[in-house]
Amino acid sequence: MSDPQIAIVMLCMFIVLVLLGFPIAFTLLAMGVGFGYYAYYHSPQSISEIFDNNIFYLLNQNTYSVMENDTLVAIPLFLFMGYVVERANIVDRLFFSLYMAARNLPGSLAIAALLTCAVFSTASGIVGAVVTLMGLLAYPAMNKAGYNQSFAAGVICAGGTLGILIPPSIMLIVYAAIAELSPLRLYAAAVFPGLMLAGLYIVYVIIRVSINPALAPKPQLEDVPPKREIYMNLLVSFVPLTVLIFLVLGSILGGLATPAEAAAMGALGGLVLAMLYRSLTWGKVKESVFLTAKATAMVCWLFVGSWTFASVFSYLGGHDVIEHWVVGMNLQPWQFLVLAQLIIFLLGWPLEWSEILIIFVPIFLPMLDTFGVNPYFFAMLVALNLQTSFLTPPMAMSAYYLKGVLKSQIELIQIFKGLMPYLAIVILCMVLMYQFPGIALWFPDYLFGVWVP
């Protein structure tokens, strides 16, 4: 077999091993080292030269590159901010306050859940944390109010995935590091697509419940507290968190701080909020630090493994084979975009966003210049598309997060059924952004000037 054929076999083996349940980061690492040893192999003259292979030097260099990457420093800080805010009991107050404020709208509990997910996502960026917390907080409230189970589950799962799109998104930081793009421009480009998607979710809920009120009964009058109490709860829960998020994002988009510096400010702000709410304990801080270290280690090993895998795949000629195949199809730019997004969408069925982003997106990046596609516009299409990786059965991770906390309260098939409308909304959002690229490109161009290749 030729080297390019070996590269394709390498890619296919990776997909099969992931589907069999092997850990992704270490599968990437093992396959990168294994196939890399073959790629850089030279006949050893002695036993001591067995390990004299360039793959080990490459692995060492990739590990060092991940550790010194300034962009990635923001990840543990944003994670810590999210975990501290989650444990400060702010989210439950926020949900209740938004529910009371939206009580006159159809599906008020669902709208409150979506708004809470959107706000908490900007402070967290962790899909699993948002879905899990809202599953414990919002689902019992909706179930008690008589909401349809599938409808309630779909709201929580869809709202929880907003965290990988709305800044400060961990996914966008990872994308910036992979594609060597400005995280500031990516954050600015994601603001309006994120708001549009959240807005479309809310519009869908209102229309759906207006057509079929039995899905979401209105709150009982005796459950509604006085307006003064509602406003005070909003003031106490919504304003401080919103101010913190505004300061973090504002400092980034205004060019006053790098993402890492803004994340450090956000982490400190999360601690201050927890202290103000008198919910900061040594145990909660230790738990937040542990969870941050655990998630950060996973991301770092994913990068080391994926960069090693991608380097070997490219060295063997895998990227060239795919690029020549796509270019040889003589596609128009719009056809290339449709093909790329369709492949990413299909990959979302068996894979999570991290594998798709780190392994498969770099295959398309070198072709953007060939087809004249703005890399920031492409990034926003990918970011929207990756929402589907959490919503598409059979590997819809948001559904499994929710099922994990609800256990026997709901069947997995009911959750899948509730996800389908939101999957269609994501696709609609992508179509709208393709028709009106300014949704993604106007804000970064306004803040930083028109992007020039």
Image (spheres, grey):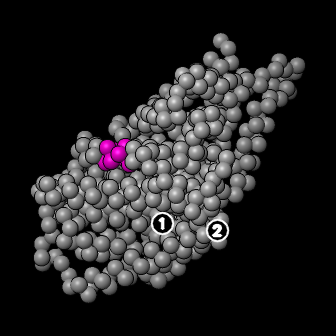
Residue at horizontal 68%, vertical 29%?
314
In front of the other: 45 or 213: 213
CA separation in Å, label 1 and label 2: 19 Å
The reply to whether the C-beta atoms of the residues labelled 1 and 2 are less than 8 Å apart is no
* Residue at the spot of label 2: 255
Residue at horizontal 59%, vertical 25%?
327
Q: Is residue 287 above or below residue 40?
A: below
Q: Residue 425 lies in magenta, yes or no?
A: yes
Q: Place residue 205 in its image quadrant.
A: bottom left
Q: Nearer the viewer, mark 1 or mark 2?
A: 2
- Name the residue type under label 2: Gly
| Label total for image | 2
Q: Upstream in the sequence, badge 1 or badge 2? A: 1
Question: What label sits on residue 240 in the rendered view?
Answer: none
Q: Main secondary structure of the magenta part?
A: helix
- Name the residue type under label 1: Ala
Span highlighted in magenta in the image: 422-430
Dot 1: element = helix
Q: Is residue 303 above or below residue 189?
A: above
* Residue at the spot of label 1: 123
